[in-house]
């Protein structure tokens, strides 16, 4: 069966695409789809464990069963709004140029 | 309730004016604006993007929840997407209520919850590059849960 995976934020840059149609075995779940992504980019371990997933625009759990034609959005931690983030910097993990 | 996503400037004055009614003793307005630096690094501009349909649905859900939870009379919630310059408004919340305590509390809850749950992301552009902003960790109720991996 085919599902459409939607990429946002840093994932859009990582895969150079906004979405991708993926062939998945019948019986696949959100968890098994995510596992296939972890295998694709294992060096981004922290990213995969920070994601939320929405199936057809609703937040979903790992055991959520996928069906033909579902839209599965991979959502990095969100950063809307303005002003300060409540989250403190995690040190100098960013390259400075 | 009035919930909207804008691709251009949020018409804050009009929205606030339209929210006022005779029974309100208080109108609390929150504007989230683009600051000129992030941890001391000079910001040039921000790009906001969203999973738009879901973001709108989530914003409507939050406003409905806040109306009930804080018993305020009415709420307007607007978020802007696209490129924003320093000083521009990315989010506007207007809470109208008979009493100020509920209006302040509802407004605070809305911005705090929006920043954790509504699928909107910002890319910060600096003089020497651009990065996606560190997001807020998702509340446990929205994370994947399950048993496959233990995220210690």
Image: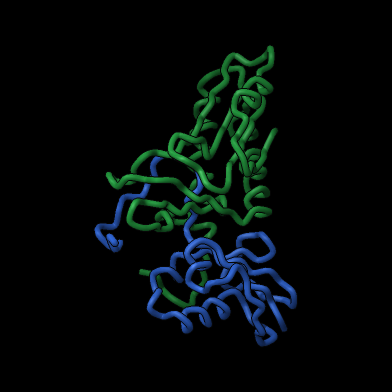
Chain colours: A blue, B green
Q: Is residue B150 found left or right of B42 in the rendered image?
A: right
* Residue appearing at x 49%, y 35% in the figure: B88
Residue B4 at what x, y percent from top left?
Answer: 67, 40
Residue B127 at what x, y percent from top left?
Answer: 34, 51
Q: Nearer the viewer, residue B106 or B7?
A: B7
* Residue appearing at x 68%, y 16% in the figure: B21
Q: Residue furthest right?
A: A68
Residue A22 at what x, y percent from top left?
Answer: 65, 81
Q: Residue furthest bottom?
A: A25
The quarter holding residue B133 reads: bottom left
Work out which quarter of the rendered image holds the C terminus of chain B and state it: bottom left
Using the image, determine if residue B122 lies above or below residue A84. Answer: below
Work out which quarter of the rendered image holds the N terminus of chain B and state it: top right
Q: Residue furthest front?
A: B127
* Residue appearing at x 68%, y 69% in the figure: A71
Q: Nearer the viewer, residue B49 or A3?
A: B49
Residue B128 at what x, y percent from top left?
Answer: 33, 56
Total numbered circles = 0
């Amino acid at each position: 069966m085919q599902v459409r995976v939607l990429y946002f934020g840093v994932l859009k840059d990582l895969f150079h695409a906004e979405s991708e149609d993926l062939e998945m075995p019948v019986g696949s779940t959100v968890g098994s789809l995510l596992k296939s992504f972890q295998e694709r980019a294992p060096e981004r371990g922290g990213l995969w464990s920070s994601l939320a997933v929405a199936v057809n625009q609703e937040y979903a759990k790992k055991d959520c069963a996928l069906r033909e034609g579902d839209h599965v959005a991979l959502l990095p931690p969100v950063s809307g709004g303005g002003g300060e983030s409540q989250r403190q910097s995690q040190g100098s993990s960013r390259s400075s140029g | 309730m009035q919930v909207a996503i804008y691709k251009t400037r949020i018409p804050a004055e009009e929205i606030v004016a339209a929210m006022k009614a005779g029974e309100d003793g208080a109108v609390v307005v929150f504007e989230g604006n683009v600051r000129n630096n992030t941890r001391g690094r000079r910001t040039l501009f921000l790009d906001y993007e969203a999973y738009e349909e879901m973001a709108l649905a989530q914003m409507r859900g939050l406003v409905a929840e806040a109306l009930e939870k804080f018993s305020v009379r009415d709420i307007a919630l607007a978020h802007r997407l696209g490129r924003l310059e320093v000083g521009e408004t990315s989010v506007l919340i207007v809470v109208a209520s008979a009493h100020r305590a509920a209006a302040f509390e509802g407004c605070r809850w809305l911005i705090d919850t929006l920043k954790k749950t509504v699928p909107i992301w910002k890319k910060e552009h600096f003089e020497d590059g651009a990065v996606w902003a560190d997001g807020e960790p998702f509340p446990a109720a929205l994370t994947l849960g399950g048993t496959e991996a233990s995220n210690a």
